[in-house]
Image: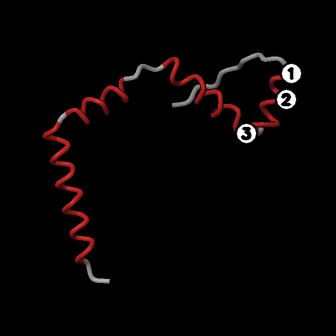
Amino acid sequence: MQKKVTITIDEAVYNGLVRVIGRRKISRFLEDLARPHVLSDDLADAYRAMAADATREQEALDWSEALIADARNAAR
């Protein structure tokens, strides 16, 4: 769900955002800037934990190798 926020910035900064980012892309640009500062690193930590799980990684590798073999043998 998105929330609408009103912010006040200097006119020169706004004009620079419009010129560099584009009028309809400012919200996304600001959200992308703010996201790493306000949200926890839970997702990055979860990826690190998954990568550290050797059994899971081997199962994922076996699964992907099996898919490659299936694709190689598929009728064209």
Residue at x 85%, y 29% (from the top left corner):
15
**50 over 64 or under it: above or below:** above
Q: Amino acid at mark 3?
A: Arg
Is there CB contact under 8 Å for labels 2 and 1? yes
Which residue is labeled 3 in the image? 24
Tell me where residue 55 appears, x and y as whole percent. 13, 40
Q: Is residue 28 left or right of residue 24?
A: left
Quadrant holding the C terminus: bottom left
Q: Amino acid at mark 2?
A: Asn
* Element type at mark 1: helix
For residue 3, the mark is: none
Which residue is labeled 1 in the image? 11
Q: Amino acid at mark 1?
A: Glu
Question: Label 2 crowding class (10 Å Cα cut-off): few <14, some 14-19, many 20+?
Answer: few
Q: State the CA–CA distance, disc 2 to disc 1.
A: 6 Å
Which residue is labeled 2 in the image? 15
Tell me where residue 13 appears, x and y as whole percent. 81, 23
* Element type at mark 3: helix
Tell me where residue 73 appears, x and y as whole percent. 22, 77
Which of 55/1 is in front?
Answer: 55
Return the disc, 3 or 2, that comes first in the chain's sequence. 2
Q: Is residue 6 left or right of residue 75?
A: right
Tell me where residue 75 appears, x and y as whole percent. 27, 82
Name which quarter of the figure residue 17 lies in: top right
Q: State the CA–CA distance, disc 1 to disc 3.
A: 17 Å
Q: Is residue 46 left or right of residue 63?
A: right
Q: State the CA–CA distance, disc 3 to disc 2.
A: 13 Å
Is there CB contact under 8 Å for labels 3 and 2? no
